[in-house]
Image: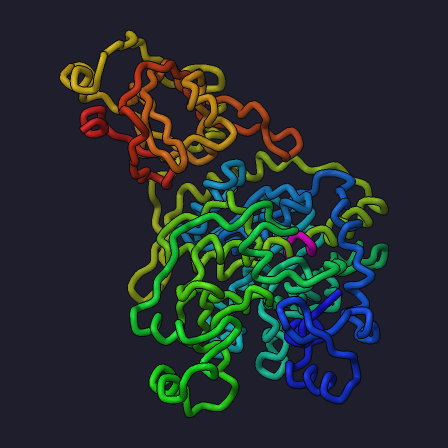
């Protein structure tokens, strides 16, 4: 199996110059692949440990690992869901997730309505109700303070202190195992003093830290040269009885071609999506750069003008005017695809990578829908842990928990009441930022209905029962002239993927909400229901016959926990538009309320 010089350098943790020296001195036979790229046959470099690991890969075997029972998990700093999605794929049941960014929270809710997502500052969450109920806790605590690209503020930077919030959650929950992830620069930050402080805190919490490891995403079926430091700690009372094994690497290196086209990791070519554009001047410059090239491939006068002061700086500056290659993994994605110092130009077209191309490089599935502005989507993807890397680590932790379970058998804890208590406490808080980014907490009304409380009062009993006659109007103009209906309120609601077919056929008699439903929608005022179909819009009008609180038919993964939803008994009335009409969902980007008059205007 072939591996390029560049990829071997990444895998072996050395420089490209060193690998090229190996080739020049004849340490290993050099060959070329079908694209003319120089590299090596992996059978000729068996003495490199990382290559031997890949050749003896247990990836396929580890894919089949299953949990001995359902393992409950909590995730902090969840972002756009890369870590959470990978761990879910490994078999974890997410009891609670926390994230501060609104767009990222909306991404989590739209894709996984069953997840309990707390939007807000982790410093205001009391985790004590979950003590002893959680098997695993994870958190990619914000890394800007520790990154080589940051200000090196460490614990003097307020973002750095969020590690202490992860530690507090561990102390309050007492999970069997917890994990933190960060940039590799954390270990050497401040001459190692920052990391030593973290290790001391883990010891004080009553946990033993497994020897940390920097995992290279390129080795775990991710088409990207990205590295993350993984910290895994086991509770002291369990540690001596078990052992932990890091995930086995995949047998080959994935490239950008594998990300953008049908491959081992994707069933079809990347779909079209929105994306940033270069200004005309930058586009003219980058059009001169060949695939896999950078500023060094530009004419000297153009390169000097484009790079400005950077021209006189030391270092390779290889991120500038960089065009990716289809036959190599992508460079590490940043939060902005067109940033001058870290450009990631499309290999074949002179433009930045699109949102979905970005997501594929991070191994997000195509049906994972990012919410917010285009910049917010890029940020969520750029900050994420690659899904396949998280999946690999998650499988290793499942094996560890299985080992613990074999020695200390236990039942999966029912977290329903604990989650209910935490969510009720959060309903009273609204976290705001002032111009100086200082945080204040004020009492406020709930941002969403508390379905747990409503369940107790309205289970299988109507909150609202409307008695309306069916309408049979021949067209919209006739419908809109009836004063008795034009002022009525209509709920416009996002239809989930698994139930949309029934709405295409107009056969649905029930709609169930997500776990979050806006409290500023007055249920008693609703008369009609209009389903919003993803990618299409709105078309049909239904009568709301009854609203109550029930359980989603298939429940969720959390043992005997009930999956409470608002249930709408509905009945098809008429088609509002000749074809689907676009509509902007405003409340939580999932629900909106309008009058009939406004809707059909």
Q: Which residues are magenta?
A: 389-393
Q: Is residue 426 above or below residue 51?
A: above
Which percent across, then down, holds residue 505? 43, 19
- At horizontal 56% and vertical 46% (from top left) the residue drawn is 268
Quadrant of the rendered structure where residue 184 is? bottom right
184 or 533: nearer the eye?
Answer: 533
Q: Is residue 557 visible?
A: yes
Q: Is residue 275 above or below residue 533?
A: below
- At horizontal 39% and vertical 72% (from top left) the residue drawn is 287
Magenta segment includes 100: no
- Give the prevailing secondary structure in the magenta stretch: helix
281 or 113: nearer the eye?
Answer: 281
Q: Is residue 185 above or below residue 233?
A: below
Quadrant of the rendered structure where residue 588 is? top left
Among all residues in the image, which is located at the extreme top?
469
Report whether 236 appears left or right of 6: right
Which percent across, then down, holds residue 535? 39, 37
Which percent across, then down, holds residue 325? 54, 68
Q: Quadrant of the C terminus?
A: top left
């Amino acid at each position: 199996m072939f591996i390029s010089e560049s990829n071997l350098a990444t895998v072996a943790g050395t420089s490209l110059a060193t690998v090229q020296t190996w080739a020049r001195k004849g340490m290993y036979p050099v060959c070329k692949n079908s694209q003319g790229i120089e590299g090596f046959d992996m059978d000729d470099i068996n003495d490199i440990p990382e290559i031997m690991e890949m050749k003896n890969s247990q990836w396929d075997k580890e894919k089949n690992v299953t949990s001995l029972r359902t393992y409950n998990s909590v995730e902090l700093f969840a972002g756009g869901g890369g870590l959470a999605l990978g761990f879910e794929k490994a078999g974890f049941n997410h009891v609670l997730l926390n994230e501060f960014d609104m767009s990222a929270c909306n991404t989590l809710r739209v894709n996984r309505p069953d997840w309990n997502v707390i939007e807000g500052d982790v410093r205001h969450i009391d985790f004590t109700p979950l003590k002893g109920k959680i098997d695993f806790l994870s958190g990619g605590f914000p890394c800007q303070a520790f990154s080589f690209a940051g200000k090196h503020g460490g614990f003097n930077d307020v973002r750095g202190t969020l590690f202490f919030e992860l530690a507090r959650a561990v102390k309050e929950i007492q999970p069997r195992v917890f994990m933190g992830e960060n940039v590799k620069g954390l270990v050497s930050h401040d001459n190692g003093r920052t990391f030593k402080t973290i290790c001391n805190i883990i010891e004080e919490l009553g946990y033993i830290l497994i020897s940390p490891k920097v995992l290279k995403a390129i080795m775990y079926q991710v088409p990207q040269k990205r590295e993350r430091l993984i910290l895994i700690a086991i509770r002291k009372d369990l540690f001596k009885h078990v052992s932990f094994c890091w995930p086995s690497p995949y047998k080959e290196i994935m490239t950008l071609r594998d990300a953008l086209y049908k491959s081992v990791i994707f069933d079809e070519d990347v779909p079209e999506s929105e994306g940033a554009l270069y200004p005309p001047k930058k586009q003219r410059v980058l059009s001169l750069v060949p695939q896999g090239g950078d500023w060094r491939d530009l004419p000297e006068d153009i390169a000097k003008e484009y790079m400005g002061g950077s021209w006189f700086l030391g270092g390779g500056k290889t991120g500038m005017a960089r065009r990716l290659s289809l036959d190599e993994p992508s460079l590490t994605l940043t939060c902005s695809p067109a940033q001058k110092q870290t450009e990631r130009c499309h290999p074949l077209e002179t433009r930045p990578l699109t949102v979905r191309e970005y997501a594929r490089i991070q191994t997000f599935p195509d049906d994972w829908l990012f919410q917010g502005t285009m910049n917010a989507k890029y940020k969520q993807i750029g900050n994420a842990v690659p899904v396949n890397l998280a999946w690999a680590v998650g499988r290793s932790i499942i094996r560890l928990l299985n080992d613990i379970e074999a020695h200390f058998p236990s039942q999966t804890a029912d977290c329903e009441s604990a989650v209910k208590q935490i969510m009720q406490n959060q309903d009273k808080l609204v976290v705001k930022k002032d111009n100086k980014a200082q945080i204040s907490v004020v009492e406020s009304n709930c941002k969403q209905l508390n379905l747990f409380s409503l369940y107790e009062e309205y289970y299988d009993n109507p909150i609202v029962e409307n008695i309306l006659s069916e309408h049979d109007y021949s067209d919209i103009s006739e419908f809109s002239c009836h004063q008795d209906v034009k002022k009525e309120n209509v709920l416009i609601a996002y239809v989930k993927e698994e139930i949309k077919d029934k709405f295409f056929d107009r056969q649905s008699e029930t709609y169930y909400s997500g776990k979050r439903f806006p409290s500023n929608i007055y249920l008693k005022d609703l008369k009609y229901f209009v389903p919003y179909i993803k990618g299409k819009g709105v078309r049909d009008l239904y009568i709301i016959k009854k609203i109550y609180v029930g359980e989603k038919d298939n429940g969720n993964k959390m043992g005997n926990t009930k999956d409470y939803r608002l249930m709408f008994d509905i009945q098809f009335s008429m088609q509002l538009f000749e074809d689907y009409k676009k509509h902007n969902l405003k409340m939580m980007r999932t629900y909106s309320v309008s009058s009939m008059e406004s809707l059909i205007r």
